[in-house]
Image (cartoon, helix red, strand yellow):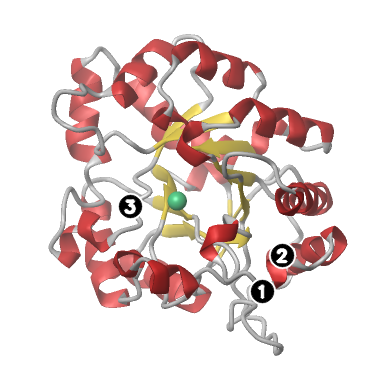
């Protein structure tokens, strides 16, 4: 039997429960927050408050999406999981180049060196210093997903990053979560990862609903990957809700490949920071909207429970207990 790797340990996929597929729970001060201060989500108390609401509304697990040295703090994620009583999957990998200073090691290390760092996060434990300095001090909290990203084109950096992620996936069985820039390059990501020998049933493409074209989504989903939509609360008055419309249009043909998340990487989206709509939005408002559009409880269970369990389980047997 396979497993899902959370910051507090490995669990059976069926224990993941109601899952948000792409979140930002902790973002510590970093190059990222220096450029965009509203990204800083470093307060554990406020995160606990936000996730207690999420839990009260039926939420059980979340996938954090801030990879190596971009404000990730696995010690805080572990404390948050413990205190809020939720499962959290922490990522290894690297984000877009723009979230790092130009001299960052991610722009310089070889594919094999990057893969080695990712594998150690997955197999041994994430560095308490988040790979931001010469000393590495590994925690017992291991990464359960490999996060990678493209901007508008594959550059040599992304070539190396995708190859390194694929190597780490082939070695460990860890699932892969990608960032797409405004939903672009989905087909290229799929073919690249397929060519690199990745099991596409354990690949999740994020933000694809920012390019809400049904034929494009059909082509991506036909490749066998899973997709994550997170713009449900972002559409402006007068735009309708293209995220809802995509789910309604695509779920009949691709019932086991669509997931939802908030990607709420700004304080202004969190109720505990005085913002809106808050992390419970998908479980409350948007679930009501999806039911109104014709989805039933089995559909919602697929989106929030069974598809995340399949996507975020490892393509590997569970290791023997320590
Ligand atoms: Zn994100």
In the rendering, at what x and y percent does residue 234 appear? 26, 38
Cα separation, mark 1 vs mark 3, equals 28 Å
- Observer-nearest of 70 and 10: 70
Cα separation, mark 2 vs mark 3, equals 27 Å
- Observer-nearest of 51 and 210: 210
In the rendering, at what x and y percent does residue 24 appear? 40, 58
**To which quarter of the image does residue 260 belong?**
top left
Report the residue marked by disc 1. Answer: 103
Report the residue marked by disc 3. Answer: 264
Residue shown at the point (44%, 58%) measured from the top left: 87
Q: Is residue 223 visible?
A: yes
Q: Secondary structure at mark 1?
A: loop
Answer left or right for 118 relative to 79: right
Confirm or deny contact between disc 2 and disc 3 (CB under 8 A). no
Count of number-bearing discs: 3
Q: Quadrant of the N terminus?
A: top right
Using a 10 Å C-alpha cutoff, classify the residue at mark 2 as few (fewer than 14 neighbours), some (14 to 19) or many (20 or more).
some
Q: Which mark is residue 107?
A: 2
Mark toward the viewer: 2 or 3: 2
| Rendered position, 172 above or below 191 | below
In the rendering, at what x and y percent does residue 67 appear? 57, 62
Q: Is residue 90 visible?
A: no
Q: Quadrant of the C terminus?
A: bottom right
């Amino acid at each position: 039997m396979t497993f899902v790797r959370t910051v507090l340990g490995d669990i059976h996929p069926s224990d993941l429960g109601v899952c948000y597929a792409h979140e930002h729970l902790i973002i510590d001060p970093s190059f990222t927050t220096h450029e965009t201060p509203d990204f800083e989500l470093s307060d554990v108390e406020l995160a606990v408050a936000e996730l207690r609401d999420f839990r009260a509304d039926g939420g059980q697990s979340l996938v954090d999406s801030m990879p190596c040295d971009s404000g990730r703090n696995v010690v805080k994620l572990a404390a948050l999981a413990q205190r809020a009583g939720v499962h959290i999957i922490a990522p290894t990998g690297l984000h877009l180049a723009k979230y790092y200073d130009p001299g960052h090691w991610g722009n310089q290390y070889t594919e094999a060196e990057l893969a080695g760092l990712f594998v150690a996060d997955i197999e041994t434990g994430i560095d308490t210093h988040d790979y931001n300095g010469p000393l590495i001090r590994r925690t017992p909290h291991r990464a359960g997903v490999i996060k990678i990203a493209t901007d508008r084109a594959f550059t040599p950096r992304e070539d190396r990053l995708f190859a390194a992620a694929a190597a780490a996936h082939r070695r460990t069985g860890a699932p892969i979560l990608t960032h797409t820039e405004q939903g672009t390059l989905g087909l290229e990501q799929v073919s690249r990862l397929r060519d690199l020998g990745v099991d596409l049933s354990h690949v999740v493409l994020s933000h694809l609903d920012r390019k809400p074209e049904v034929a494009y989504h059909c082509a991506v989903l036909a490749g066998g990957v899973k997709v994550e939509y997170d713009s449900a609360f972002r559409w402006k008055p007068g735009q309708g809700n293209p995220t809802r419309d995509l789910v309604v249009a695509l779920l009949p043909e691709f019932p086991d490949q669509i997931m939802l998340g908030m990607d709420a990487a700004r304080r202004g989206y969190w109720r505990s920071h005085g913002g809106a709509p808050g992390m419970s939005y998908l479980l409350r408002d948007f679930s009501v909207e999806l039911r109104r559009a014709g989805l039933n409880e089995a559909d919602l269970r697929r989106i929030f429970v069974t598809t995340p369990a399949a996507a975020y389980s490892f393509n590997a047997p569970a290791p023997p207990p320590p």
